[in-house]
Amino acid sequence: MIRAMIVDDDALVRLGLADLLGSDENIEVVAQAADGLQAIEQATAHHIDVALVDVRMPHMDGITAITRLRALPHPPKVITLTTFDLDEYVYNALAAGADGFLLKDTDPAEILRAVHLVAAGSAMLHPTAARRLIDRYHAANQPRTTAARGRLNQLTPRERDVLALLAKGGTNADIATDLAMRESTVKAHVSRILMALDVTNRVQAALLARDAGIT
């Protein structure tokens, strides 16, 4: 059972997401919060596997909340929810440790899929929005390219192949199929990649790969 928390200052959004997540027999909504402060309180009081967090909220915004959530002794995975005109906030949220993001008009089935994927250790980036968002900030931050490439030099050629597919949103199963590898081998490569690049999750590894220009 995946234990979920919904964090959004809009009560109707919380209600709709709670109904949606509740329709999946493998997801249980154990907490809700109207802002980042409440989210920290709830995550401290309950064991949360996945938190769906809005970006713009009163008292404590989503980006700050993500940083605080990821610093907890047992941090939940985080999916950021946003509207398309808040690209810059989402980029910062991913850099803060979010495991992915969705637009608020994402198909309900994809939201459920995202919760399952993130709970299992994968990332979930809305394909079109992710490309536009990361490309926009990659172009605006060219000085980061040299540093990113230096960090990627620590990887073997096979690990770079895995990272390139990971950066495109591939799951472990997808990468295993594309590279004709066992899924367990892919998992081992991903763990080594995260350690070598000194990042906490797949999304941050993907951002680094994009900065280095390998995708």
Image: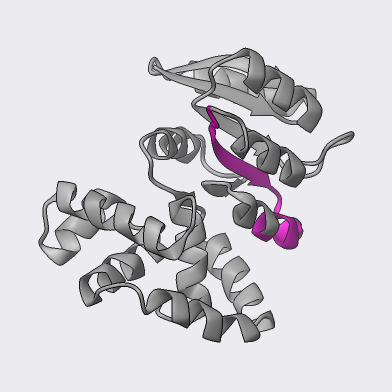
Q: Is residue 82 left or right of residue 58?
A: left
Seen in the picture, residue 9 relative to 78 is either above or below; the reply is above
Q: How far from the left and from the top, in percent, is residue 63?
A: 73, 46
Q: How far from the left and from the top, in percent, is residue 211?
A: 53, 76
Q: Residue at x 62, y 57 (%)?
A: 95
Q: Residue at x 71, y 50 (%)?
A: 83
Location of the C terminus by quadrant is: bottom left
Q: Is residue 88 left or right of residue 187?
A: right
Near-viewer residue (78 or 144): 144
Q: Is residue 211 left or right of residue 26?
A: right
Q: How far from the left and from the top, in percent, is residue 172?
A: 26, 51
Location of the N terminus by quadrant is: top left
Q: Is residue 88 shown in magenta? A: yes
User: How many marks are shown on the rendered structure?
Assistant: 0
Q: Residue at x 38, y 63 (%)?
A: 196
Seen in the picture, residue 62 relative to 137 is either above or below; the reply is above
Seen in the picture, residue 159 relative to 26 is either above or below; the reply is below
Q: How far from the left and from the top, in percent, is residue 166?
A: 36, 61
Q: How is the image coloured?
A: one colour
Q: Is residue 33 visible?
A: no
Q: Is residue 40 shown in magenta? A: no
Image: magenta residue range? 74-91
Residue 202: image quadrant is bottom left
